[in-house]
Every structure is written in C-alpha cells, then in structure tokens.
Amino acid sequence: MKAAFTCLLIDDDIDDQEIFQLALEEVNTPVTCNTASRCTEALELLSSETIPDFIFLDLNMPGMDGKEFLREIKKDEKLSQIPVVIYSTSSDPKDLRITRELGAFDYIIKQSSIVSLRKILERFFNRQQINNSN
C-alpha cells in the first residue's frame, strides 16, 4: 500500500527516533518517514529529495537548533510551504509561542510511551486526512 503521507523526523536522540518510528508503524494511516540527526543534515535532504508532507522537528539540537532551522526554511519559497510540527520535550509556553510566531504548524510534547505517542500521531494524521478530503 502506498503511504498516505511522507514525513521527515529531525531529532538527534536515537531513542526518540526509534520511539517515533515504532509509534508510526502502529498508526492506522500509512506514513513513510525519513530521519535526520542534525538540522544541517535535514537541509541537505530537503534540497536533494522529494519534499515531505510534514516535518517533525526537535527544538534542542546540537549546532543549528530547531528554532534556527524553522527560520532557515521559512526563507525558502518551496520549503516554507512544508508544515513543521515541533516534537520536543519542552512544555514551556514560551517555546510554544516562539515556534508559532516562527510558523510552526503544530506542537507535540514527546512521550516516553509508544502507546501515548501513537494515539497523538493517529489523531494528527486522521485530522490531516479529513482536511485533505475537504
């Protein structure tokens, strides 16, 4: 079955990448997801590969952080159209406000439980399918 959505996960934590991928495998919507461990790596992928439907972005990254990455892609006409979902451990309202101001599409707080994350991702992708069908 062809994936309904494609995404790019940008996260330097291998454990968080694995939890995200495992949760995606259990989501009712077929999703193909590539990963990048650094924002600079993600920019290279975005310039050389097919543009994903969504980007899931950690804020606390080495080198270029998530906020800098958001600023960078919003400068590019093609990349600025990709919805960016912040995927972070931070529940600080300031981070939520700043990332919204920078153009983030949504904000998901990281879950240590695959079941919890799967439920959040299912709601997210179900909403997107409904929006795409309207």
Image (spheres, helix red, strand yellow):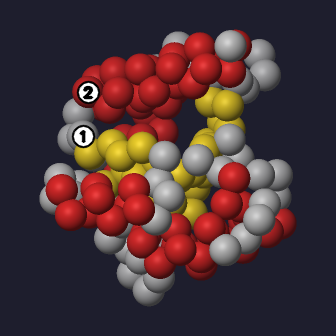
Placement of the N terminus among the 4 image quadrants: top right
Q: In this view, does 10 lie to the left or right of 77?
A: left
Rendered image quadrant of residue 63: bottom left
> Which of these two is toward me, 121 or 77?
77
Q: Which residue is pictured at 33% across the width and 65% down the height?
A: 98
Amino acid type indicated by mark 1:
Gln
Q: How dense is the environment of label 1, judged by Cα within 10 Å: few (below 14), some, or many (20 and up)?
A: some
Q: Is residue 134 left or right of residue 125?
A: right
Residue 87 shows in the view: yes
Rendered image quadrant of residue 89: bottom left
Position in image of residue 32 (x %, y %): 66, 36
Contact check, label 2 and label 1, Cβ < 8 Å: yes
Give the mark, 2 or 1, whose residue is nearer the N terminus.
1
- The residue singled out by tag 1 in the image is 111
> Which of these two is toward me, 37 or 86?
86
Q: How dense is the environment of label 2, judged by Cα within 10 Å: few (below 14), some, or many (20 and up)?
A: few
Placement of the C terminus among the 4 image quadrants: top right
Position in image of residue 88 (x %, y %): 31, 55
Residue 58 shows in the view: no
- What separation in Å lies between label 2 and label 1 (alpha carbons)? 6 Å
Which numbered dot is residue 116?
2
